[in-house]
Amino acid sequence: MRLERSLFTDENCSIRRTLEIVGERWTLLILREAFYGVRRFDEFARNVGCPRDVLSARLKTLVANDILERIPYREAGHRARHEYRPTAKGRELLPSLLALMEWGDRWAADPAGPAVAVTHGECGEAVEVQLRCAGGHGPLDAADLRIQPGPGAKLAA
């Protein structure tokens, strides 16, 4: 799985760019809540526990990056407000969040066990995140992978 890193810069790294958008603790917890079905600012504030100004800034970033969409609603007798729902782009982050959860369930869970169980709605079996190649082989682990420069790799000076 070894890539000769000294030959290429990290300026075009997809992991780095992704972390610039979602790689902050509160952002990941906001996304967790969005996938749990939370939609409204006050619910996010209550469930995530971050300061309201931080929550507002993180929601704006997620909307600006088309990860959440802001949808207006109005309850009778109240001012207009907004709900936040994952976009198609945002929903593609679910496997990443589930992989973090799976790792945490294995290595950082409470002695009583994980706080949340994710199961397939149709059959009830536990959901697992697995690496598979486009040819259908898997599950794969690090020893099965070959890491090589992609088309966007930039040579080091």
Image (spheres, helix red, strand yellow):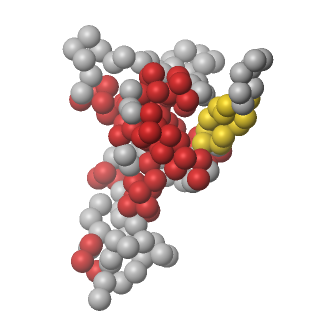
Q: In this view, does 105 lie to the left or right of 56?
A: left
Which residue, as the protein is rendered here, is positioned at the far top? 112
Q: Quadrant of residue 112?
A: top left
Q: Is residue 28 visible?
A: no
Residue drawn at 55 percent across, 15 percent down: 124
Give the residue displayed 44% in from the left and 39% down from the top: 53
Residue 109 picture quarter: top left
The residue lying toward the viewer, choosing from 142 and 38, is 38
Q: Quadrant of the C terminus?
A: bottom left
Location of residue 110 by image quarter: top left
Point out the image quarter for the N terminus.
bottom left
Q: In this view, does 107 lie to the left or right of 15?
A: left
- Horizontal and vertical percent for residue 92? 57, 44
- Figure check: 4 above or below 56: below
Which residue is rendered at x = 63% and y = 18% of the image?
122
Is residue 132 visible in the rendered image? The answer is yes
Residue 20 spot, x, y in % from top left:
41, 57
Residue 83 spot, x, y in % from top left: 65, 32
Figure label count: 0
Q: Give the answer, above or below, for where 4 lies relative to 119.
A: below
Residue at point 40%, 54% (across, down) = 19
Viewer-proximal residue, 136 or 73? 73
Residue 127 place in picture, x, y as percent: 48, 26
Q: Residue furthest bottom?
A: 157
